[in-house]
Amino acid sequence: MNTIGNGSILVTGAAGQLGAVGRTVTGLLLNRGLPVRAMVRREDDRAAALRAAGAEVVVGDLLEPAEVYRVVSGCRRVYFGMSVSPGYLEATVTMAAVAREVGVDVLVNMSQMTVSQMSTQNTTPSPQQRQHWLSEQALAWSGLPVVTIRPTVFLEGFFLPLTGPSVRGRGRIELPFGHGKTNPVAAADVARVVAAVLAEPEPHLGRIYELTGPRSQDMHGIAGEYSDALNREVTYSDIAPDDWERELKKAGLPEHLIRHLMTMADLNRAGRYDRLADGVARVTGRPAMSVREFVSLHAEEFAARRPSNKTVNASM
Ligand SMILES: NC(=O)c1ccc[n+]([C@@H]2O[C@H](COP(=O)([O-])OP(=O)(O)OC[C@H]3O[C@@H](n4cnc5c(N)ncnc54)[C@H](OP(=O)(O)O)[C@@H]3O)[C@@H](O)[C@H]2O)c1
């Protein structure tokens, strides 16, 4: 196994769900023969799988400075990302304070593409987007060698859990996205970008990478890609935001996440997710995955079943 100066590459939020960024980044770095310290919140099957894959697994809480210090110590390259949650800004600033003290060669920060549209005069009501915007500012003030990753909405973390049940049950994508265009990106592609930067940080230091899929289109266009991939008709139904919010509440999603999702829906309706960026191809040399390719890869999870609308497990 190669060594990276002194120590391993730290990947936070490494447990994740299948397809989550930290978990995929860990696998990609290990495949390159690089040493990875995978940070998880608790010992469980996911931690065991990371260990079995060859990662050094460390348990810690990103909101506990002493634990972050212990986890970062000995690593010169860090990927920082965690679940959408109220403590995100605190965790980022804690990581920045520790990284300054320990000294790192690169901190790859997961952010969101909406930050590109934000300023002091123009924020959004999403508590998560505001925290990403502030986190980016704090990291800029820190003077750390940062690389910023700004993806648009994920296929794995959003479209799979939030359209899967209605596509399986009724052959419909049901979202309050109006006629706005959107261009989701696969978290697998986002992870490829992060892994490429961590493997060779130097040319990327100080850069901001905006990441989207290959085509911006309205939800009827997205439904058409689902239909092509699944070889059956999938249509788009523009539902009322209030109905969607009720569904999200019924599914037990946390308030912070619901407020974020409702803002995303508003921004989608306003055309603010009509985006096209070439970060995936620029960093990895391979184009981003299309919706059709993604749905084909996950065809079983979208396969028609008896009607059900229960499983909502967005990680965002
Ligand atoms: N989903 C999207 O559409 C989208 C789009 C653009 C950007 N993003 C950004 O992507 C990031 C989320 O990426 P993801 O989906 O790969 O992550 P994720 O799977 O939702 O979360 C990664 C891990 O963070 C861990 N975690 C949460 N709180 C923690 C804490 N206090 N200490 C230590 N670990 C903690 C969780 O551990 P447990 O599993 O044990 O709880 C989880 O496994 C966020 O920054 C989000 O804003 C998401």
Image (tube, helix red, strand yellow):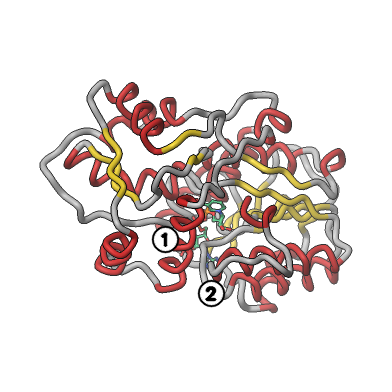
Q: Do tag 1 and tag 2 residues touch (Cβ < 8 Å)?
A: no
Crowd around label 1: few <14 · some 14–19 · many ≥20 (10 Å): few
> Which residue is situated farthest in the left direction here?
306
**Label 2 SS:** loop
Q: Which mark is residue 52?
A: none
For the image, the number of numbered tags is 2
Q: On the image, numbered disc 1 is attached to which residue?
A: 44
Quadrant (top left, top right, bottom left, bottom right) of the N terminus: top right
Residue 154 vs 295, above or below: the answer is below
Q: Which x, y percent locates residue 262?
A: 43, 62
Query: Nearest the camera: 62 or 35?
Result: 62
Question: Which marked residue is nearer to the observer: mark 1 or mark 2?
Answer: 2
Mark 2 is on which residue type?
Pro
The mark nearer the N terminus, 1 or 2, is 1
**In the figure, 232 relative to 48: above or below?**
above
* Residue in the image at 68% along x and 64% along y: 133
Is the C-beta of the residue carrying label 1 under 8 Å from the nearest atom of ligand 1?
yes
Q: Within the image, what quadrant is residue 248 found in?
A: bottom left
Residue lying at 58% horizontally and 72% vertically, measured from the top left: 61
The CA distance from mark 1 to mark 2 is 24 Å
Mark number for residue 86?
2
Front residue of this view, candidates 152 and 194? 152
Residue type, label 1: Asp
Question: Where on the picture, by quarter, is residue 78?
Answer: bottom right
Where is residue 142, by image quadrant? bottom right
Residue at x 85%, y 61% (from the top left corner): 144
Q: Is residue 206 above or below residue 249?
A: above
